[in-house]
Image (cartoon, rainbow, N blue to C red):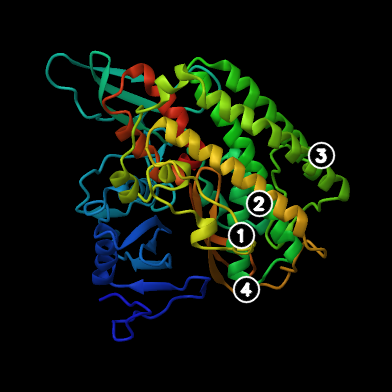
Amino acid sequence: MLFTPEDPNSTAPAPAASCRPWARETVDDAGWRAAIEEIAGRKADLLSLWSDGAHVFMAIVGRATPKIRLVSLDCPQGRFPSVGVRHPPALRQERTIADLYGLTPEGSPDTRRWLDHGRWGLRHPDGEAAQIETASDAYQFSPAEGAPLHQIPVGPVHAGIIEPGHFRFSCNGEVVVRLEERLGFVHKGVDSLMAGAPLDKAAKLAARVSGDSTVAYSFAFARAVEAAYGVEPPPRAVWLRALMAEIERLANHFGDIGAICNDAAFALMLAQCGLVREKLLRAASACFGHRLMMDRITPGGVAVDLSEEGVTTLRSLLEKIGVMVPRVVALYGDTTSLQDRTVATGVLSAELASQYACGGFIGRASGRRFDARAAIGYAPYDALSFELGESTGGDVDARVWVRFDEVRASVEIIEQILDRLPHGPIQADLSAAPGGAEGAALVEGFRGDIFVWLRLAADGRIERAHLRDPSWFQWPLLEAAIKGNIVADFPLCNKSFNCSYSGHDL
């Protein structure tokens, strides 16, 4: 039996190190399997699965109450019970652990390499590395058997300015029977680059995991560091972080709504939304000195304060957005040619969204209401009021309407922040060495919840770190959503998901 706070008679493993704010439980093999059964039995959702080479770690969140638990298992023999054999959403993370550290998930139904394409010159770069000589590894895609099935390979190099990923379509004429993805082309080794890094360097690495979510990653990383230190940032810094996060959310939602419509050959929406997005980026530059607000959130606080002129700039921008939103909503909703392309296209079932703990607008558009801002309730969102999107049709259209709802919510949040922004300092003191500690955080980015765990060395450097993008649990669902659609609708489905290549491959 795994220890739970609700059951004081359960078998309580020795609490681990001082991980904050969620204590980590070191479990044995039986405890690890019990945690697997919790997520396989839908009592909890998997937040992440990772390793440091000597242990495997799992973060889960309860469904009845959104309480986060961290468990870890020692792996002295280099193997651990597979999570993926009972819970398929864990398969790609297990394959990544095997690629990077050489640990074997016992019983896994999929032992193919995932991030390792045979181009690193070695195996298990973060474990017991072994040299290899190969130009690349062969990869066995699922076959398309029987006439008239055929396969269409797409990528990894794509037209336009996106990152690399390979898509293998199995089709019956124009209809997609199966899609299989191959990712990992832009693996950067962020976790290993952070090992041994001082905080300022590690914070910059976190900010560069996925450029469109640089604020959210900086936010999550900073909260994890502060949790390890047991330090609270100043109130003004906390509110400025949320302000930046909502500006980032608005800019991405406007950009994606326009791009989705552009993929349905309705470029007018792209132009209208692109105009708003550009105004947001220019306002961010004027207020915080960077269009994407990169490196503006740091462990302990924020690097840049908001001036009174900045407040005026943002209030003026909100007025313009308030005028534009009804126009673009009407333009989208009243254009039947758009509805023809988006309604009933790329449907993601509520069942799969729930099983994969799919976050963000993708999950909410399929009925999964989880939003870390509300469910976990971290500051300052626990003091703000906002509504989540209501559309639950699971198709491209629902994902667009949820984004519109989130645009309205972000505007209301920004107005509340500007009205109530506290005065005072913007940085807490992190000069005292923490003496070795662990910290974790879950922050809602525009794409979904971002998880960060880290362990600090006695001198304050990063000893180990793990960052998990929401795309890990969204990419597999794109494979399901495109099934039964025609090939020509794939760009529309893909853009309505807008999963991150860089965030996944990190």
In the image: residue 376, left or right of residue 182: right
The foreground one among 174 and 147 is: 174
Determine whether the residue tagged by mark 1 lies in a helix, strand or loop.
helix
The foreground one among 128 and 301 is: 301
Mark closer to the observer (1, 4):
1
The answer to whether marks 4 and 2 mark residues whose Cβ atoms lie closer than 8 Å is no
Mark 4 surroundings: few (<14), some (14-19) or many (≥20) residues within 10 A = some
Residue that mark 4 sits on: 230
Can residue 138 be seen at all in this image of the molecule? no
In the image: residue 325, left or right of residue 112: right
Above or below for 368 versus 162 = below
In space, the residues marked 4 and 3 are separated at their CA atoms by 33 Å
The answer to whether marks 2 and 1 mark residues whose Cβ atoms lie closer than 8 Å is yes
Which residue: 69% across, 43% down?
A: 294
Mark closer to the observer (3, 2):
2
Q: Earlier in the sequence, mark 4 or mark 2?
A: 4
Residue that mark 1 sits on: 381
Which residue: 34% across, 67% down?
A: 73
The answer to whether marks 1 and 4 mark residues whose Cβ atoms lie closer than 8 Å is no
**Which amino acid is tagged 4?**
Gly
